[in-house]
Image: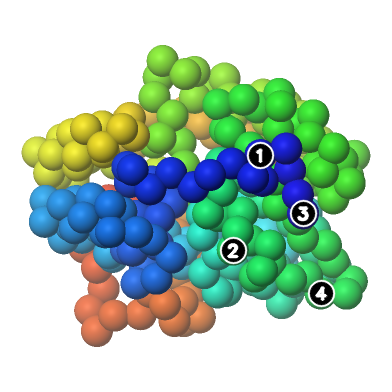
Amino acid sequence: MTTPHTTRDIDTSRPHSARMYDYYLGGKDHFDVDKRAAETVAAAYPGIFVCARENRAFMHRATRVLAQEHGIRQWLDIGTGIPTEPNLHRVAQSVVPDARVLYADNDPLVLKYAERLMRSTPEGRTAYIEADINEPEALLDAPELAEVLDLGRPVALSMNALMHFVTDARDPYGIVARLLGALPSGSALALSHCTPDFDPPTWEKVTEIYTNAGTPVQFRPRKDVVRFFDGLDLLDPGVTVGHRWRPDSSDGDAATTEPPTDAQVSLWTGVGIKP
């Protein structure tokens, strides 16, 4: 799918969070500048690789739960990142083949791979738009959104490892509320968010690395992550560390010889349903 920004050049002069995340997951779709920045983060916080894997595992579980137990058939996934199989639509469509998924990210490299890798089942639909989380109105007004999603039916808003890239100066809670406000009753918010709660000095270093690389971040404590779910009915077990949110045996990419520690994961996760 083309967008007005499809031809925008890929900026390789500074690291990008989506490409650094690809490195954490062991992917190959990043540049040297991303690798260097990611390795600097890993030197300060070796758990970043565990955190990235557990974040994906949470996304898989939350998607399955929403499809199997709550009848969700539509997803708006913002901050998609570079596709890594199985991506959200593969998980959703393995449960409900007619699932419809709209991905959104603001890196043209993500668009390049999205066009090649995101293939839907015949019954369902997937599409990608280049959009910025800091401009929710533009995202909601995008014609592709209306083509893929029916906002008269429940939609799961998926925001994995995204909102810590939106500092308080940009009104993160207002952004989430605006997006949820456009969705009907029965919709859901699935959100994960890195936190300094288990090792503040380390996360102070990580914040400095990202900020100095040109990507402002704000890693929040649990009480501030819980605020994103204001007005929603939280599913059990509430807002909890990523590997503790409904763990199951299907998380092959999160499997380790020993369970990770909370400090390694350092990721608050939760799923809430809009009344």
Q: Distance between the residues labelled 3 and 4?
A: 17 Å
Q: In which quarter of the image is residue 189?
A: top right
Q: Mark 1 points at which residue?
A: 5
Marked residue nearer the N-terminal end (3 or 4)? 3
Q: Mark 3 points at which residue?
A: 1
Q: Do the residues labelled 4 and 2 touch (CB within 8 Å)?
A: no
Q: What residue type is labelled 4?
A: Thr
In front: label 2 or label 1 = 1
Q: Residue at horizontal 49%, vertical 24%?
A: 172
Dot 4: element = loop
Closest to the observer: 105 or 33?
A: 33
Closest to the observer: 211 or 11?
A: 11
Marked residue nearer the N-terminal end (4 or 2)? 2
Q: Which amino acid does label 3 sit on?
A: Met
Q: Name the residue under label 4.
A: 121
Horizontal and vertical percent for residue 204? 15, 35
Q: Distance between the residues labelled 3 and 1?
A: 11 Å
